Image (tube, coloured by chain):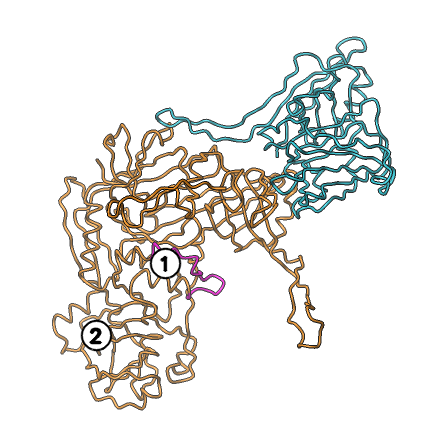
Chain colours: A orange, B cyan
């Protein structure tokens, strides 16, 4: 029984509002704090439910009509193929009789239970001279020691794509106190007489699949003529400029810009603006029946259609995608992950770390866009990486497999500082020095379709000619680093506004206008504590770090193997 | 002090088991699995019993309960009979209720689980059916874990081990240091290890019984080593259930004197 010592709050105004004496705080305990206190004395559990196609399960059938069967009769039927629990541990563990999973023995056969490598700045979306770029994560094999053959049945299970969870805790804890330190999808199985190895893929890989599309059926109206059958309907997510369109009704001059839209900001023909009639119609029939004056256009936003009042040659438009998708990178990525993958692959709301999405949206909720044309096969991960690079950020999977976002920014002072007492006796190593940036160019507001001079009408103004024939507008931010080998960096984005591009340039030049160092710091006793993007102080009595410096965590190497080494890679300004 | 005892689970290899209510992951067949963590988990504290049918009457001189998660109030009662009905109706052997573990505390490296045994020595009991009842009504875990039960016609050499035997704990933990010298211990479970030598053995003991045990268990089959089967205190420290680290060969030290070394490592729950 917990004993409570009464602690009375201080005088009104003397303590922060909402302050709660520790003795009255019965909130959820910080499991990672417990794990850290346990040092290396941890037990890891594997919880998975591989599918056994030969096992039979039982389910209740629908009850018979009232009155035809005795009250309480519950018909059951058997079915073939069920998920079979695999419960293994790094040390023998027996759950408590009061646990949600009572009296389950976890044989201690995992060695190692897991290892994970996560890093930032690894995808090709960043210029080679810049440390920016997307994130990547790879998970090492889970090794099941099986010399005695007690786990032989595991290889006859169907593991592919099943979720596996690694939990960490102390052997005397109840099962419910264990914390998830890694969650992923089983991607492979191999092994021999001595061991079986489960390959684990981070759940970020789930995003690395084709985006589902809608296709023209060729049945006429918005579905397009037969010549368009089986072509993907173009889509606009967010805001896109000078988007081409596909003619679906030549007689009525109706074009399909995208699957659906929320606004047409501007329409052009051969670069020359067409006047907006201001009318929007609910469906194809209403749009067809409408009268559109010559030189004007009307819309059916619900179906992404534009009807011109005169014959057009090369129509384009500045448009906003459906408002349900949103116009910021976090919103679009969330829409993509939740709804635009194969139904078996979509992310549930619990698979998304909403906190990081909200934080990024609050900091860089800038309008961006992504255009999906008719012919390209799009990959969810590539789209998400590109959208995040547009705002100087990354997408990643958290330890529990949930998607999370982060942005690059100059590291700020952290309440946590690594010192010599935390660093393995082998000491930190300088992994690289990255040249300072003297000029940061941000390309923004891209034209989806760029015109050559001859594509455009002779009546197009000179300023519009420049606009439409150049893919990006640019913002240039200069710095004056002392380094003689400082570089100029250009990052092209789909940001729509100059102000947002300027804000991005400011943030990145703030981070990179000094040469940066990348340190690899081997740790003792601090697994689980840090993850990509964390700000962290480093104080060490060599290498100019005597007074401490601020860093960002850009790499995490972690293993449950006691003979292995946990290591962080840190990025920060050279002293 | 009795001569050492070396037992195996060979007699129980073909036995049938039944018990009081048990957890799905702790059936009674686990009693002869090698690992102590593969245990019988009895979930009804008012029905803590296990019955063993050896298939035919066997001479038993050692009954051991190992890795039992009992409290200091735990008692056990062992009965042997010619039929299952006689086990409770008219047992041929009845130990009556005995305190389990001699009131000793379980060793931490065994998660506090207790060992105990009944050594019948020169007065073995020959029965086909055996029943062990435990009583531990106030067990706070609301269950009783019984790691292993050994029923055997155990080997007790006619001459005891030589002086100079060793028994104790091996701790495989590692202690890397940080830059400042602070130790960051990575604790691993300890286990017991023991070495002893039968230096004055007879041909019958060593080329007979000891050789046969080696053939049966090798270095992967489990054995139970009791340093002093008659011990009335420190029983927990004088029993190793584990594997032979290596098989010692038998040498003839002198006329009618055979010698063999044993090296054992414990299995822990």
Q: CA distance from mark 2 to mark 1?
A: 31 Å
- The secondary structure type at the circle numbered 1 is helix
Question: The N terminus of chain B appears in which quarter of the rendering?
Answer: top right
Nearest to the observer: residue A393 or residue B37? B37
Q: Which residue is rendered at x = 34% and y = 82% of the image?
A: A248
Q: Is residue B134 above or below residue A63?
A: above
Q: Earlier in the sequence, mark 2 or mark 1?
A: 1
Q: Is residue B204 above or below residue A561?
A: above
Q: Which residue is rendered at x = 17% and y = 68% of the image?
A: A467
- Give the percent coordinates (x, y) of residue A113: 51, 41
Mark 1 surroundings within 10 Å by alpha-carbon count, few (fewer than 14), some (14 through 19), many (20 or more): some
Q: Quadrant of residue A11?
A: top left
Query: Is A237 on the left or on the right of B50, as rendered?
Result: left
* Tag 2–tag 1 contact (CB < 8 Å): no
* Residue A344 falls within the magenta-colored stretch: yes
Nearest to the observer: residue B66 or residue B218? B66
- The secondary structure type at the circle numbered 2 is helix
Badges 2 and 1, same chain: yes
What are the residue bounds of the magenta stretch?
A339-357
Q: Chain of mark 2?
A: A
Point out the residue furthest to the top here.
B254
Query: Is B241 on the left or on the right of A401, as rendered?
Result: right
- Give the percent coordinates (x, y) of residue B239: 67, 25
Question: The C terminus of chain B appears in which quarter of the rendering?
Answer: top right
Q: Is residue B119 above or below residue A34?
A: above
Q: Is residue A213 above or below residue A426?
A: below
**Mark number, residue A455:** 2
* Residue B235 falls within the magenta-colored stretch: no
Q: Mark 1 = which residue?
A: A382
Q: Quadrant of residue B191?
A: top right
């Amino acid at each position: 029984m917990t004993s409570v010592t009464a602690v009375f709050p201080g005088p009104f105004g003397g303590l922060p509002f909402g302050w709660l004496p520790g003795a009255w705080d019965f909130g959820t305990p910080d499991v990672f704090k417990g794990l850290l206190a346990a040092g290396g004395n941890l037990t890891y559990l594997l919880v998975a439910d591989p599918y056994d196609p030969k096992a039979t399960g039982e389910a209740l059938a629908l009850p018979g009509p009232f009155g035809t069967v005795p009250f309480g009769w519950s018909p059951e039927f058997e079915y073939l193929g069920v998920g079979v629990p695999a419960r293994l541990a790094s040390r023998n563990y027996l759950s408590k009789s009061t646990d949600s999973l009572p009296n389950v023995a976890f044989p201690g056969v995992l060695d190692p239970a897991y290892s994970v490598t996560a890093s930032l700045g690894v995808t090709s979306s960043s210029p080679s001279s810049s440390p920016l770029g997307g994130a990547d994560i790879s998970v090492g094999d889970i090794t099941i020691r099986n010399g005695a053959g007690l786990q032989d049945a595991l290889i006859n299970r169907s593991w592919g794509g099943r979720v596996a969870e690694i939990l960490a805790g102390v052997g005397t804890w109840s099962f419910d106190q264990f914390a998830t330190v890694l969650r992923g999808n089983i991607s492979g199985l191999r092994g021999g007489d001595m061991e079986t190895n489960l390959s684990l893929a981070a759940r970020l890989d789930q995003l690395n699949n084709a985006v589902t599309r809608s296709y023209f059926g060729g049945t006429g109206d918005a579905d397009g003529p037969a010549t368009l059958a089986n072509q993907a309907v173009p889509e606009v997510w967010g805001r896109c400029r000078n988007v081409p369109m596909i003619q679906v009704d030549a007689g009525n001059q109706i074009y399909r810009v995208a699957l659906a839209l929320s606004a047409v900001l501007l329409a052009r023909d051969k670069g020359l603006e067409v006047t907006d009639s201001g009318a929007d119609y609910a469906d194809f029939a209403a749009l067809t029946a409408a009268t559109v004056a010559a030189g004007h256009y009307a819309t059916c936003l619900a179906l992404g259609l534009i009807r011109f009042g005169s014959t057009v040659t090369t129509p384009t438009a500045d448009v906003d995608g459906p408002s349900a998708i949103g116009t910021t990178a976090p919103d679009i990525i969330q829409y993509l992950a939740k709804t635009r993958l194969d139904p078996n692959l979509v992310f549930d709301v619990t698979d998304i770390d909403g906190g990081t999405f909200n934080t990024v949206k609050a900091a860089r909720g800038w309008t961006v866009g992504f255009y999906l044309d008719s012919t390209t096969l799009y990959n969810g991960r590539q789209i998400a990486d590109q959208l995040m690079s547009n705002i100087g950020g990354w997408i990643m999977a958290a330890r529990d497999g949930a998607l999370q976002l982060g942005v690059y920014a100059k590291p700020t002072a952290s309440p946590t500082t690594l010192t010599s007492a935390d660093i393995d006796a082998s000491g930190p190593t300088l992994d690289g020095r990255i040249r300072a940036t003297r000029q940061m160019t941000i390309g923004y507001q891209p034209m989806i379709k760029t015109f050559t001079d001859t594509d455009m009408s002779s009546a197009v103004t000179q300023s519009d000619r420049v606009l439409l024939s150049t893919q990006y507008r640019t913002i240039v931010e200069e710095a004056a680093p002392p380094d003689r080998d400082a570089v100029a960096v250009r990052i092209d984005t789909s940001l729509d506004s100059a102000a947002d591009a300027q804000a991005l340039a400011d943030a990145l030049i703030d981070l990179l206008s000094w040469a940066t160092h990348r340190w690899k710091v081997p740790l003792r006793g601090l697994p689980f504590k840090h993850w990509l993007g964390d700000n962290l102080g480093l104080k060490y009595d060599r290498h100019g770090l005597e007074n401490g410096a601020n860093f960002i965590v850009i790499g995490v190497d972690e293993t449950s193997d006691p003979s292995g080494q946990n290591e962080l890679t840190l990025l920060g300004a050279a002293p | 002090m009795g001569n050492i005892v070396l037992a195996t689970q060979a007699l129980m290899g073909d036995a049938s088991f039944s018990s009081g209510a048990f957890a799905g992951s702790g059936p009674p067949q686990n009693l002869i699995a090698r690992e102590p963590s593969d245990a019988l988990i009895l979930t009804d504290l008012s029905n803590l019993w296990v019955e063993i049918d050896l298939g035919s009457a066997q001479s038993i001189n050692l009954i051991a309960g190992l890795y039992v998660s009992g409290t200091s109030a735990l008692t056990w009662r062992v009965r042997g009979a010619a039929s299952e009905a006689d086990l409770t109706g008219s047992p041929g052997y009845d130990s009556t209720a005995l305190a389990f573990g001699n009131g000793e505390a379980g060793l931490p490296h065994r998660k506090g689980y207790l060992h105990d045994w009944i050594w019948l020595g020169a007065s073995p009991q020959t029965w086909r059916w055996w029943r062990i009842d435990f009583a531990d009504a106030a067990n706070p875990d609301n269950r009783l874990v019984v790691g292993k039960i050994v029923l055997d016609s155990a080997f007790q050499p006619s001459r005891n081990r030589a002086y100079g035997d060793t028994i104790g704990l091996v701790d495989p933990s590692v202690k890397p240091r940080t830059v400042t010298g602070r130790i960051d211990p990575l604790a691993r479970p300890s286990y017991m290890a023991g070495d002893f030598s039968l230096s004055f053995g007879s041909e019958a003991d060593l080329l007979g019984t000891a050789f046969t045990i080696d053939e049966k268990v090798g270095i992967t089959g489990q054995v139970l080593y009791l340093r002093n089967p008659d011990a009335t205190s420190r029983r927990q420290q004088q029993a190793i259930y584990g594997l032979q680290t290596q098989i010692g060969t038998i040498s003839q030290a002198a006329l009618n004197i055979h010698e063999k070394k044993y090296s054992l490592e414990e299995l822990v729950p």
